[in-house]
Amino acid sequence: MSPRSTTASGRARPRRCSRPSSPQGADPEDGMDETVQVAVHLDEGDAARMRMALNNIANLCAHYAQAGQAVAVELVANGPGLALLRADLSPLPEKVAELAADGVRFSACANTLRGITRDEGAAPALLPAAQIVPSGVVRLIELQRAGWAYLRP
């Protein structure tokens, strides 16, 4: 079973989302026993759009947890959307940490990071939950080819 995160009171709580280890999909013939897999694309730097994406993720994790069905969620941030995962710019670092503790994966586009490094003269620090992928758009394609649903809030 996956590790548990803790609440503000220090009590353990089960993860609501499964952490995806790879873009491998479950057998579609398994029906409702199949893990629901959702790729969330964030390519806008607007704080309201970021909040909407994270709220969508929290709501779908809660829905499937209540239904007793496993769900894997990966948010892929590229372009201006990468601001969500920057330690110096993220308007919602606590919400990212909370969702990561629930098993949501946060992927940061290396191509965008290279552009920021070139433009700003230094690589930006990322939130601890962020994992760098070579290309955000390629990661989305890989996930979709493996059967993941695509959501762009």
Image (cartoon, helix red, strand yellow):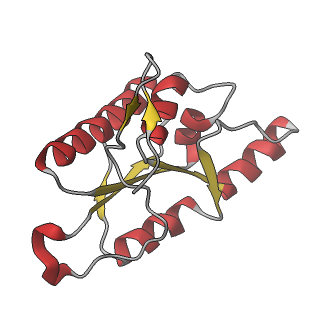
Please give left or right for residue 148 compared with residue 2 in the image: left
Look at the picture and state if 7 lies above or below 138. above
Q: Which residue does the image show at 31% across and 32% down from the upper left?
A: 55
Q: Position of 69 compared to 3: left or right? A: left
Image vertical order of residue 88 relative to residue 41, above or below: above
Instruction: Say which of 58 and 53 sits in front.
Output: 58
Q: Is residue 36 left or right of residue 20?
A: left
Residue at x 44% of width, y 64% of height: 140
**Toward the viewer: 92 or 14?**
14
**Horizontal arrangement in the rendering, residue 147 relative to residue 20 (left or right):** left
Total labels drawn: 0
Q: Residue furthest right?
A: 121
How far across and how far down the image is residue 125, in percent?
75, 36
Q: Residue at x 55, y 26 (%)?
A: 93
Name the quadrant of the N terminus.
bottom left
Residue 145 x, y percent position in the rendering: 37, 78
- The quadrant of the rendering that contains the C terminus is top left
Against 144, residue 44 (above or below) is above
**Quadrant of residue 122 within the rendered picture:** top right
Position of residue 114 measured from the top left corner of the image (x, y, whole percent):
76, 52
- Spot occupied by residue 66 in the image (x, y as percentages of width and height): 15, 42
Query: Considering depth in this image, is 120 or 34 the residue closer to the camera?
Result: 34
Q: Residue at x 43, y 72 (%)?
A: 23
